[in-house]
């Protein structure tokens, strides 16, 4: 938000809104190494949504966390994207990821020598 030159008051309001919704307000002063995997993922979601992007590309957003926390992350991501009208593209090996999307595209047996340029 600093690079986008968002005014301080607007930045503070946005941070408060995202951290409250994602239940991470109490971690605002914590360093990442002191957060659990799920807490780190929720911080990453807040950062991704901070500037109201039209699209978020999430590559294995739940790759390093347990199943229960993964469901929370998917729920938070999809819900926040619906609220802010943001397109979410998830690249994942997790079959549960499609439960949180409106559309699924499956890529299999992709070979680089078969891609036309």
Image (cartoon, helix red, strand yellow):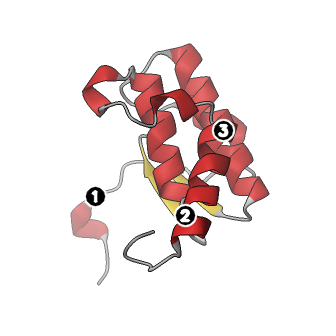
Q: Quarter of the image containing the N terminus?
A: bottom left
Percent x, y of residue 9: 59, 67
Which residue is label 3 attached to? Answer: 20
Percent x, y of residue 114: 29, 68
Q: Could you classify mark 2 by the number of other residues whose Cα lies within 10 Å: few (under 14), some (14-19), or many (20 or more)?
A: some
Which residue is label 1 attached to? Answer: 111
Q: Nearer the viewer, residue 94 or 3?
A: 3
Which badge, 3 or 1, comes first in the chain's sequence? 3
76 relative position to 42: left or right: right
Residue 45 position (above or below residue 13): above
Percent x, y of residue 20: 66, 38
- In this view, the residue farthest toward the left is 113
Percent x, y of residue 115: 31, 72
Q: Secondary structure at mark 3?
A: helix
Residue 109 position (above or below residue 117): above
Q: Secondary structure at mark 2?
A: helix
Q: CA distance from mark 1 to mark 2?
A: 44 Å
The residue drawn where x is 46% and y is 27% is: 39
The residue drawn where x is 45% and y is 37% is: 28
């Amino acid at each position: 938000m600093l690079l986008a030159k968002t005014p301080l008051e607007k930045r503070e309001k946005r941070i408060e809104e995202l951290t409250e919704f994602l239940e991470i307000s109490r971690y605002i002063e914590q360093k990442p190494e002191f957060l659990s995997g799920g807490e780190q993922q929720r911080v990453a979601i807040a950062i991704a949504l901070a500037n109201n992007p039209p699209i978020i590309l999430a590559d294995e957003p739940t790759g390093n966390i347990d199943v229960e926390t993964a469901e929370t992350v998917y729920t938070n991501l999809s819900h926040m994207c619906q609220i802010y009208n943001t397109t979410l593209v998830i690249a994942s090996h997790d079959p549960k990821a499609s439960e949180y999307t409106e559309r699924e595209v499956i890529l299999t047996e992709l070979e680089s020598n078969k891609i036309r340029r």
